[in-house]
Image (tube, grey):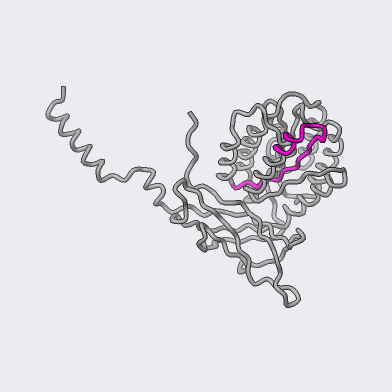
């Protein structure tokens, strides 16, 4: 039974609710905090373009120019995660080549970089936490190599964990190098959930696909498509080496790219977001010439970001 006092309280609460803006509306109306973009600039042949100044870049958020609040160029340290497939589908015959290429990659990175290493089969395992000592990473690589591949492939779960680990890094530039065949068959997270988490993060994914030519072609193409999509969405690249020379070249290119990028901080526009909070981002370059001719270049960065958290899982 309602007492008079309780009825008055209910009426007051109802009246207050009419003039109260829902929390999610308030959140969307608040200014979106500044974001950092890691940008790689190349010519039409894929060669790295370095030495550009802040004035050469325009950041477009939803097609609208955004204010650039910070700019850094050159060889700066980064947080780099190595995610290595240890499942039964991994190409055992090429593991020795992979070890050699990864060793050269670590030694070719900025001496101040910090690393972590995750191996995965049925589940991800942190073999080496964040460390600034390359010797720790190489020792972790030896431990990885000592275990024969077995089990299924929790690729999505492992990259999800790797993204979170990278977010704890010291540096603004954060990257994950994912070495796998691209096949997932046991993850708890779906591809859609992983991709959303990737777009929430500021981590760049570089995928090195070690595909077994003996597997079914449909599976091979499917794994390749997954790796290409994750890399492209984050502003990274996907490599599919077919020989030892290709593998070494891929990791040499990776090390060089990580040491020759631009980091642009910009202020997003709250009005540029779509209904789901998605900001589509593009970087435009202008006024670049060589020998009196316009230089054709490509500015590669992440596809965008969300300014609201993803829906909670049930």
Residue 164 x, y percent position in the rendering? 60, 38
Residue furthest top as drawn: 1
Residue 198 lies, with reference to residue 297, above or below; the image says above
The answer to whether 102 appears left or right of 59 in the picture is right
Please report the bounds of the magenta region as a residue range: 202-223
Residue 228 falls in image quadrant: top right
Residue furthest bottom as drawn: 292
Viewer-nearest residue: 40 or 142? 40
Number of numbered markers = 0
Residue 142 falls in image quadrant: top right
Residue at screen point 68% across, 39% down = 130
Viewer-nearest residue: 138 or 86? 86
Q: Does the segment drawn in magenta span residue 211?
A: yes
Q: Quadrant of the N terminus?
A: top left
Residue 98 falls in image quadrant: top right
Q: Does the segment drawn in magenta span residue 64?
A: no
The answer to whether 28 appears left or right of 256 in the picture is left
Residue at screen point 79% across, 40% down = 135
Residue 274 x, y percent position in the rendering? 46, 50
Residue at screen point 63% across, 48% down = 234
């Amino acid at each position: 039974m309602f007492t008079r006092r309780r009825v008055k309280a209910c009426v007051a609460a109802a009246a207050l609710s009419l003039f109260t803006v829902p929390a999610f509306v308030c959140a969307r109306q608040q200014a979106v905090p500044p974001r950092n973009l890691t940008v790689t600039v190349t010519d039409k042949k894929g060669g790295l373009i370095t030495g550009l100044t802040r004035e050469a870049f325009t950041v477009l958020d939803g097609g609208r120019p955004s204010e650039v609040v910070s700019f850094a160029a050159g060889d700066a340290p980064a947080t780099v995660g190595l995610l290595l497939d240890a499942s039964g589908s991994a190409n055992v015959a090429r593991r020795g080549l992979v070890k050699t290429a990864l060793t050269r990659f670590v030694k070719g990175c900025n001496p101040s970089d910090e690393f972590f290493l995750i191996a995965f089969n049925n589940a991800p395992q942190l073999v080496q936490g964040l460390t600034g000592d390359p010797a720790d990473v190489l020792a972790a690589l030896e431990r990885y190599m000592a275990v024969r591949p077995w089990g299924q492939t929790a690729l999505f779960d492992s990259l999800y964990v790797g993204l979170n680990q990278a977010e704890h890094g010291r540096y603004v530039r954060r990257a994950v190098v994912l070495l796998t065949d691209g096949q997932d068959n046991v993850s708890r997270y779906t591809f859609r959930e992983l991709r959303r988490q990737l777009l929430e993060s500021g981590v760049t994914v570089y995928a090195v696909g070690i595909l077994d030519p003996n597997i079914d072609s449909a599976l091979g193409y499917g794994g390749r498509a997954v790796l290409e999509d994750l890399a492209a969405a984050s502003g990274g690249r996907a490599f599919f080496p077919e020989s030892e020379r290709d593998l070494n070249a891929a990791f040499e290119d990776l090390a060089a790219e990580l040491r020759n990028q631009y980091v642009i901080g910009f202020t997003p526009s709250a009005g540029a977001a779509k209904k789901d909070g998605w900001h589509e981002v593009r970087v435009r370059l202008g006024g670049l010439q060589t020998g009196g001719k316009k230089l054709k270049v490509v500015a590669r960065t992440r596809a965008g970001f969300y300014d609201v958290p993803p829906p909670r899982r049930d």
